[in-house]
Amino acid sequence: MSAVLHLEGVFKHFGGIVVADDITLEIERGQILGLIGPNGAGKTSLFNIVTGVVPADAGDIRVNGVSIAGKGIHERARMGIARTWQNMRLFRTMTVLENMVVAPREYAGESMVRLCFRPGAVRRADEQACEQALAILERMQLERLADNAVTDLPYGQQKLVGLARALMNDGPCLLLDEPMAGVEGHAYETMKAVVRQEAQAGRAVCVVEHNISFIKDLCTSAVFMSAGRILERGQIADLLASKTLAELYFGT
Ligand SMILES: Nc1ncnc2c1ncn2[C@@H]1O[C@H](COP(=O)(O)OP(=O)(O)OP(=O)(O)O)[C@@H](O)[C@H]1O
Ligand SMILES: [Mg+2]
């Protein structure tokens, strides 16, 4: 089966720090790949490279066989690369619903020309985005919070809103940066169920997590990164038994 997301020889450095050193990996339809590694390993940087937040210095990234080299953040989002952020990055003065409505793959109100000359089209797109957002919130049992300011929600629910917002982009790739950090109880179970459903629906999912139980529950395979390099990859059980992980990650 050909990969949905394919990174080949990706390299990136910030001054003297190499955050991606010849990274090659593939994620297939329906796969949830775990990406684990110590703080500063380069996990978030890899998501930033894939989503176009920072340019790679070398290497290629393909989505369903199409290279995304040279494409900007918005174009990559339109091609269906959705992500959550480690630090959430929700718009703090907006409600839950407003946060979501500005997030679909193609946000019509973003174009000033369309806004001025085709206001009807923008309104219709907003209505569609609202419907889509409410359906996602309902699925995540958050619909009653749609009109709440995001800052009024407990932390776990804010993390769920971060995922809900990412789901407004229903493209083939979903990248989740520490979705479970600070999430417990009901929100934890909801997060797990929704991520699993997204993969079952055929998306290629990559999850960065320090919560190893979450990785064990959801992923069959994972890669282990340290100092910008992939040092181990394979089935979760084998990975967790590896000496390299024991030394560099678990500190034993
Ligand atoms: N834009 C940037 N400019 C300079 N250095 C950066 C930049 N982004 C990340 N770094 C550095 O790159 C290294 C890798 O950071 P990154 O955030 O990718 O790690 P991480 O694996 O996500 O860690 P954590 O588990 O703590 O989230 C760190 O040393 C960080 O300070
Ligand atoms: Mg990170």
Image (cartoon, helix red, strand yellow):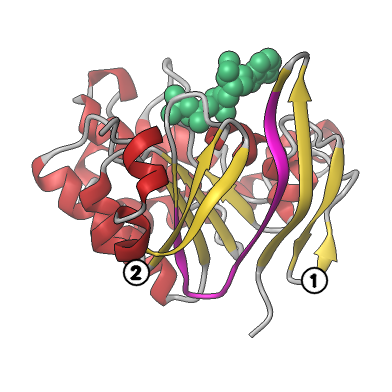
Q: Is disc 1 placed on a helix, strand or loop? A: loop
Q: Is residue 171 above or below residue 125?
A: below
Mark sitting earlier along the chain (2/1): 1
Residue positioned 54% across, 47% down in the render: 231
Residue marked by disc 1:
65
Query: Which label is found at residue 37?
Result: none
Q: Is residue 94 or residue 174 the one in the foreground?
A: 174
Q: Is residue 155 above or below residue 229?
A: above
Q: Amino acid at mark 1?
A: Gly
Residue positioned 46% across, 33% down in the render: 99
Q: Amino acid at mark 2?
A: Gln
Q: Is residue 33 magenta?
A: yes
Image-quadrant location for residue 5: bottom right
Q: Is residue 213 or residue 175 the one in the foreground?
A: 213
Neighbour tally class for label 1: few under 14, some 14-19, many 20 plus, Cα within 10 Å: few
Q: Is residue 195 magenta?
A: no
Which of the image's four quarters has the C terminus?
A: top left
Image-quadrant location for residue 128: bottom right
Instruction: Considering the whole magenta stretch, tell me its main secondary structure.
Output: strand
Q: Is residue 220 left or right of residue 180?
A: right
Q: Is residue 197 above or below residue 53?
A: below
